[in-house]
Amino acid sequence: MIQAVDRAVRILMVLQGARRMSLGEVAAELQLAPSTVHGIIRTLLAHGMVAQERDSGRYRLGPATLRLGNVYLHTLELRSRVVGWAEDLARRTGCAVRAGVLLQGDVVVVHHEPRPDGTRQMPEVGIVIPAHACALGKALLASAADQPGGAPLRGMTADTVTDPALLRAQLDVVRRTGLATEVEEAVIGECGVAAPLVDALGEVPGALGLVVPAGQWPLDPAATEALRTAARSISQELGARSWPPTPRELPAATA
């Protein structure tokens, strides 16, 4: 591993999620000397990967990371397959539609189709949500090689499932039914249901989900069935031979 590259990547990871941090805060987070961090940040600034705020002097992710992210998202076969189906699914159900992929215990939203009701909604592509706290994440974790261990999970709201044993029980249900749900676990007032997307190798590269205000939960069965149909169809386009994914023997969780 090249140390300078590793440290640059770690700095970018620390600044993810719209965080704005001082040099000292970044150094403390990474347990590195401020002088070491300063040299790397100056290089990242020169390439637009990091930006510095004029008024506060704090650092944040720069515009170059967004450009790289958009290039990556647009090259994803998964996203290209999802776009048309997500638009149709939103129109048929009246729900917002998200597609996401798993990244180190989190879900990254790679496509977002807003509710077709004309209300103002924030774009969600690129947001990161703890996998255990959202329906998309549970749909992905159910087929992941790394299963939840014994350590308590981070709570996002009072309803987040933080008990690994309870989460594992929920994932068993996902494997049997092909659907995952969450009720105000990631965001208060928001609920969701999601289904895994399967590729030609039988792997689960992503998940597709519906998101609704808590006042509209539970969903009409017709909306859930529309989600199943879309997930099955996208999986077929990805080369899957069957949907939902075939349950397989998973490694035992570790504490």
Image: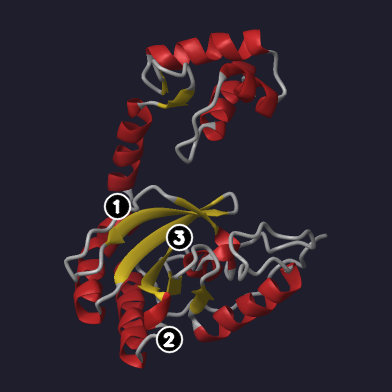
Would you call the spot at circle 1 few (<14 residues within 10 Å), some (14-19), or many (20 or more)? few
Residue nearer the viewer, 196 or 92 = 92
User: What's the residue at 65%, 69% (across, down)?
Assistant: 161
Disc 1 designates what residue? 123
State how the image is colored.
Answer: secondary structure
Q: Where residue 248 appears, x then y in whole percent? A: 62, 75
User: What's the residue at 29%, 38% (across, down)?
Assistant: 71
Disc 3 designates what residue? 205
C-alpha span from label 3 to label 1: 22 Å
Q: As drawn, is 36 to the left or to the right of 254?
A: left
Q: Is residue 124 above or below residue 160?
A: above
Q: Which amino acid does label 2 sit on?
A: Pro
Would you call the spot at circle 2 few (<14 residues within 10 Å), some (14-19), or many (20 or more)? some
Q: What residue type is labelled 1?
A: Pro
C-alpha span from label 3 to label 2: 27 Å
Disc 2 designates what residue? 218
Numbered disc in front, either 3 or 1 = 1
Residue 217: image quadrant is: bottom left
